Structures are given as C-alpha cells and as structure tokens.
Amino acid sequence: MKLLKNKWFISVLTFFLLLIDGQLSDLLTTLTGRYAFLRVHLLIIFMFLLLRFLDTDFFAYLLGFILGLIYDSYYLNFIGITFFMLPLLVYLIKRSKKYFVTPTRSFLAFFLLLFLFEVGCYGLAFLYHLTTYSLLSFVTYQLAETLLLNVIIFVILDKFVHRNSAK
C-alpha cells in the first residue's frame, strides 16, 4: 500500500488504466458482435478504491480533470463529458468515503456512483447531440451490461483490497 501513496506511480498507473479501459471496452463490444456496448471502468474502480486511502484533495481533483480531458480528447474528440464527470465523481467519493466501512456499503456506493456516471455521461452526450440512442436503447444495450460487468470486477478487486489493507 506504500506504493499507492506515491503520486507519480498513481499518475502513471491511472493513465495506463485509462488506455486499457478503452481497449477492453472495444474488445468486449467487438466480441458481442456490436450487440451490446460494454464499457469497462477500471479507472473508476481504481479511483474508488484508492480515494479511500488517499488524503490529498488537490491531487485527486487535478488527476480527475487531466484524465477526463485525455479521455474526452482521445476517445470522444469532444471535451466536456468525462472532463466534467470524473471530477464530479472524485468529489462524490471524497465526500462520502466515511461511509465505505463495510464491503456491502462499498458495493452499494460503487454501484450508485457508477450508475450516476453512466447516466450523467449519457445525459451530457444527449444534450450535446453526440448520441442518437433513445433512453430505452441506452439502458438495454449499454447501462445494464456495463453495470453488471463493472460490479463483478469491483467485487473481486474490493475483496483483494480489503484483505490486503487489513494486513
């Protein structure tokens, strides 16, 4: 856990997770025959788990803004959606981290935050006319599958973090 207090290591790791997120999402979408649009959120899972132990506010917000800017410019070619949503997510995690004391509460909080992130991104994309998905299509083909996949990944990683942080 000492390595996770190093800001340079965290910055490089989150950047690589950002790149892996997009590649895994594209791979899973291709494997489903473009029937379901799965988004893997390793970056959000890592930030959720990390912000429980990290006490610096400025660094977390700065990292959220920078990674949001990189994500928007690299994947969307439009700055504004993730650039706004990631720092908002950091704020919500930082404000409510005192409630993440049990694995059940962590799970429920992560599920709620991921839901808010996905719906917020869809809402902003719809507002900016970047998507033509109807709300029903979004929920059916992206939201449900994305939440299920990321919750499974989170439960596995959260057990690992709880086990190792107790040592």
Image (cartoon, rainbow, N blue to C red):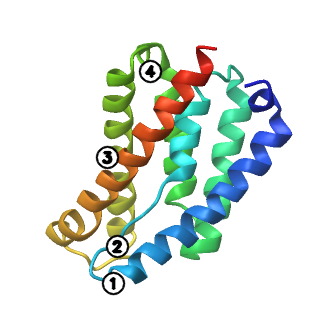
Q: Which residue is mark 1?
A: 34
Q: Nearer the viewer, mark 2 or mark 4?
A: 2
Name which of mark 4 and mark 1 comes first in the sequence: 1
For badge 4, the amino acid type reads Ser
Name which of mark 2 and mark 4 comes first in the sequence: 2
Task: Give how far apart the Cα atoms at labels 4 and 1 are.
Answer: 36 Å
Residue under the point 43% across and 47% down: 153
For badge 2, the amino acid type reads Phe
Expressed as whole percent of the image width and height from the top left, the position of residue 9 reads: 82, 41
Residue under the point 65% across and 37% down: 61
Name which of mark 1 and mark 3 comes first in the sequence: 1
For badge 3, the amino acid type reads Phe
Is any atom of residue 70 visible in this view?
yes
Task: Give how far apart the Cα atoms at labels 1 and 2 are.
Answer: 7 Å
Q: Which residue is mark 3?
A: 115
Name which of mark 3 and mark 2 comes first in the sequence: 2
Residue under the point 67% across and 62% down: 70
Residues under numbered marks 4 and 1 in contact, where contact means CB atoms less than 8 Å apart: no
Q: Which residue is mark 2?
A: 37
- The numbered disc on residue 60 is none
Task: Give how far apart the Cα atoms at labels 2 and 4 are.
Answer: 30 Å
**Which quarter of the rendering shows the N terminus?**
top right
Residue under the point 67% across and 24% down: 54
Residues under numbered marks 1 and 2 in contact, where contact means CB atoms less than 8 Å apart: yes
Quadrant in which residue 132 is drawn: bottom left
Q: Which residue is mark 4?
A: 96
SS at circle 3:
helix
Expressed as whole percent of the image width and height from the top left, the position of residue 138 reads: 24, 67
Quadrant in which residue 118 is drawn: bottom left
**Which quarter of the rendering shows the C terminus?**
top right
